[in-house]
Amino acid sequence: MKMNCWDYKMCGFEIGGDHQDSQGVCPVAIAKKLDGINSGVNGGRFCWNVEGAFCQPNTQCTKAEKLKTCESCNFFNLVKQEEGRQFKRIEELNV
């Protein structure tokens, strides 16, 4: 099973995570329309496409901010490597 961003980053903002009750669930974890993209659960392997995602604890990023930084993210690059030719980017899906 491939890791979702919340597993990789161990952030605790997923459904049932350590921070769910105190700070809420990250929009990535509940982005059902993205389920299955890059073999992820909800937006878990397409997090760079979700505005308001909790990139760092206590920080939310806009989609524009994310697009500037995600390509240098270790998780982004792991997904890209694991998915190979099947890797999906925002530009390809027009979401």
Image: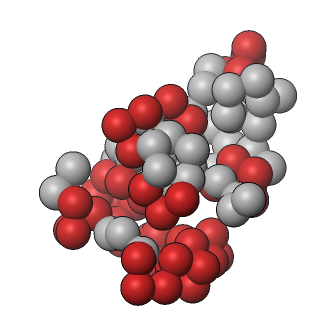
The quarter of the picture where residue 35 lies is: top left
Classify 52 as above or below 39.
above
Residue at 41%, 85% in the rendered image = 85
Residue at 62%, 21% in the rendered image = 24
The quarter of the picture where residue 88 lies is: bottom left
Classify 6 as above or below 91.
above
Q: Is residue 46 left or right of residue 22?
A: left
Is residue 94 among the parts visible in the rendering?
yes
Residue at 65%, 54% in the rendered image = 4
Q: Is residue 28 left or right of residue 50?
A: right
Please, which residue is most extreme toward the top here? 21
Classify 85 as above or below 8.
below
In percent of width and height, residue 64 lies at 28, 58
In percent of width and height, residue 19 lies at 76, 26
Residue at 52%, 77% in the rendered image = 83
Q: Is residue 17 left or right of residue 25?
A: right
In percent of width and height, residue 62 lies at 35, 47
Of residues 48 and 89, the one drawn nearer to the viewer in this rendering: 89
The quarter of the picture where residue 34 lies is: top left
